[in-house]
Amino acid sequence: MTLIEQSVVLVKADAIHDAAQTVARAINDKQPISRAMINEAMQAAFGATNASGVWSQRDSFEMLEHATVLALVIEQAINDDC
């Protein structure tokens, strides 16, 4: 993998993590998670819609899995502090 390809992977991973943090907060706030919310989080993190090709729906599914784990970690941290 070239240095440029590695940079692209890191930028994409960072954007997915940013979107996951947004969705994890919503999960912890007991908000319903909708396709629209997921798309909004991804669009905000990537600065573009999936139609641009910068991210895919598959990426959003992986982000949701990441958000679920983050929400559990946050919940556990809160419970440990109590």
Image (cartoon, rainbow, N blue to C red):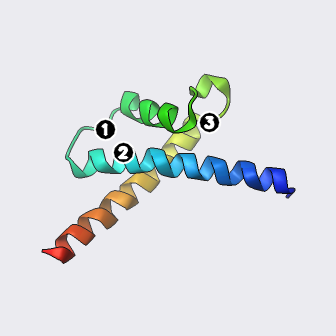
Q: Mark 2 and mark 3: span between their CA atoms?
A: 17 Å
Q: Residue at x 40, y 52 (%)?
A: 67
Badge 2 marks a residue whose secondary structure is helix
Badge 3 marks a residue whose secondary structure is loop
Q: Residue at x 32, y 58 (%)?
A: 71
The amino acid at mark 1 is: Ile
x, y percent for residue 79? 18, 71
Please indicate, yes or no, whether residue 61 appears anywhere in the rendered image.
yes
- Which image quadrant: the C terminus? bottom left
**Measured along the vertical axis of the image, is residue 12 above or below residue 36?**
below
* Mark 1 Cα-neighbour bin, 10 Å: few <14, some 14–19, many ≥20: few
Q: Mark 1 and mark 2: span between their CA atoms?
A: 8 Å
Which disc, if any, is residue 2? none
- Which image quadrant: the N terminus? bottom right
Q: Which residue is mark 1?
A: 33
Q: Are marks 1 and 2 in contact (CB under 8 Å)?
A: yes
x, y percent for residue 66? 45, 55
